[in-house]
Amino acid sequence: MRNTFAALLASGTLGAAIPPASAQAQLDFTLVNRTGYTISEVYVSSMSSDDWEEDIMGRELLEDGERVEIEFTQGAKGCKWDLMVAYDDEEEARWQGFDLCETSVIELHYDRDKGTTWAVYE
């Protein structure tokens, strides 16, 4: 089943995520960039957290058309996670409440005419 989740471009600072060993396989997902832009930063944070932590991409970039495997390690709990990406032009997009226990792929898209970004996930 595919779902769509929309978000407007926003500004701010954000961070990364880390869950428990027992939930690791459930929370891992593939992030696919289909926005037409380079993503320079990716942050994943538990919905229950007020802190975005650190950029999980480090110094790497996620070019348009590329994908990256987001793997969790011990530390965090729960299925509901927020996602934020920053593009190389410093614009940002955020989503809240991805159920990573049920999601294996998140594909990001951007509509230049409308100025919106959205995620299709399965």
Image: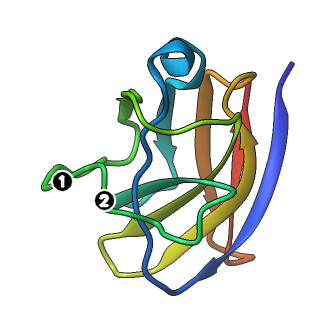
For the residue marked with disc 2, what is the amino acid?
Answer: Asp
Helix, strand, or loop for circle 1?
Answer: loop
Position of residue 21 measured from the top left corner of the image (x, y, whole percent): 44, 17
Is 77 situated above or below 36? above
Residue at the left extreme, as displayed: 59
Disc number at residue 69? none
Would residue 17 appear left or right of 59 to someone viewing this image? right
Is 88 situated above or below 84? below
Query: Where, by quadrant of the figure, is residue 113 drawn?
Result: bottom right
Residue density around tag 2, few if under 14, some if 14–19, many if 20 or more, within 10 Å = many
Query: Where, by quadrant of the figure, is residue 78 drawn?
Result: top right
Position of residue 1 measured from the top left corner of the image (x, y, whole percent): 87, 18
Helix, strand, or loop for circle 2?
Answer: loop
Would residue 117 appear left or right of 2 to someone viewing this image? left
Residue at the bottom extreme, as displayed: 11
**Viewer-proximal residue among 85 and 23:** 23
How far is mark 2 from mark 1, CA to CA?
6 Å
Query: Where, by quadrant of the figure, is residue 106 drawn?
Result: top right
Name the residue rendered at 40%, 54% in the picture: 16
- Say which residue label 2 marks: 55
Position of residue 35 measured from the top left corner of the image (x, y, whole percent): 52, 54
Name the residue rendered at 83%, 26% in the picture: 2
Quarter of the picture containing the C terminus is: top right
Position of residue 76 measured from the top left corner of the image (x, y, whole percent): 51, 39
* Type of colouring: rainbow
Q: Are marks 2 and 1 in contact (CB under 8 Å)?
A: yes
Name the residue rendered at 69%, 48% in the picture: 119
- Say which residue label 1 marks: 58
Name the residue rendered at 40%, 38% in the picture: 65
Would residue 13 appear left or right of 23 to someone viewing this image? left
